[in-house]
Image (spheres, rainbow, N blue to C red):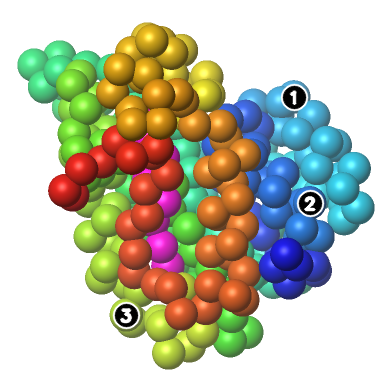
Amino acid sequence: MDLGLRGRRALVFGASRGLGFAVADELAREGARVCAVSRDGGRIEAAAAHLSRHGEPAMALCADLGAPGAARAATARAIQELGGLDILVCNSGGPPKAVFAEVDAAAWSAGFQNLWLSTTDAMAVALPVMIAGGFGRILLVTSVAAKEPMPGLTVSNGLRAGLLGLVKSVAPEVAAQGVTINALLPGYTRTERMTEIGVSDAQVAAQVPMRRMGEPQEFAALAAFLASARAGYITGQAIAVDGGWLRGS
């Protein structure tokens, strides 16, 4: 199915590995011009080189979303280099695993900057451009933990749930201008993050109805669809890609 993404201009944060890379790769396969962002300069250059093999030259941008103002500057730079922006994918690494008693003020502040302010800053720059062009797709990569908190992920649980409220608040404000905003909630997906928080295949098989982890490409397929014109009547939603793990949320 041709999603009509050829020539669309996309900015993807956290695109050097994991879900961010999978989404950037899927968009590039569909013909989008991708600006890929990561704090690791070497990895993001390699990722952009891979994306460019699909036809459209990809742009690599090194930026640390944990630094104040970095997301805003990166978004402005991407708009300048791409000549506009049609698709924004807000994606960042998860905060360290910790229960509430282990989280100090610095950890809360770092998580807020990385997960929340990087998103709102990027949206603030992107939205006027999208509204002026009459088309925009903003995707917030959160987690199923936004609806069903996971043990030991206190910072992530709290802040990602707030992002769902942000989606519900802003989506109606820009819907009539041709801009959609949706949240994607990955479940247990085979990425480096699962290794970092110590989740095994056996643990997932015992909890997920599909009895396996998801693959990044399965998540990316939904992201590409939501980024397309075909998904123009879908906005303000939080859609899980979790193998049926969420129940009643």
Q: Earlier in the sequence, mark 2 or mark 1?
A: 2
| Mark 3 neighbour density, 10 Å: few (under 14) some (14–19) many (20 or more) | some
Residue 63 vs 202, above or below: the answer is below
Viewport quadrant of the N terminus: bottom right
Q: Nearer the viewer, residue 150 or 2?
A: 2
Type of amino acid under label 1: Gly
Residue 79, image quadrant:
bottom right
Disc ID at residue 42: 1
| Identity of the residue drawn at 71% across and 33% down | 44
Residue 140 vs 137, above or below: the answer is above
Which secondary structure, mark 2? helix
Give the labeled residue for mark 2. 29
| CA distance for labels 2 and 1 | 22 Å
Disc ID at residue 86: none
Which secondary structure, mark 3? helix
Give the x, y percent position of residue 162.
22, 51
Type of amino acid under label 2: Arg
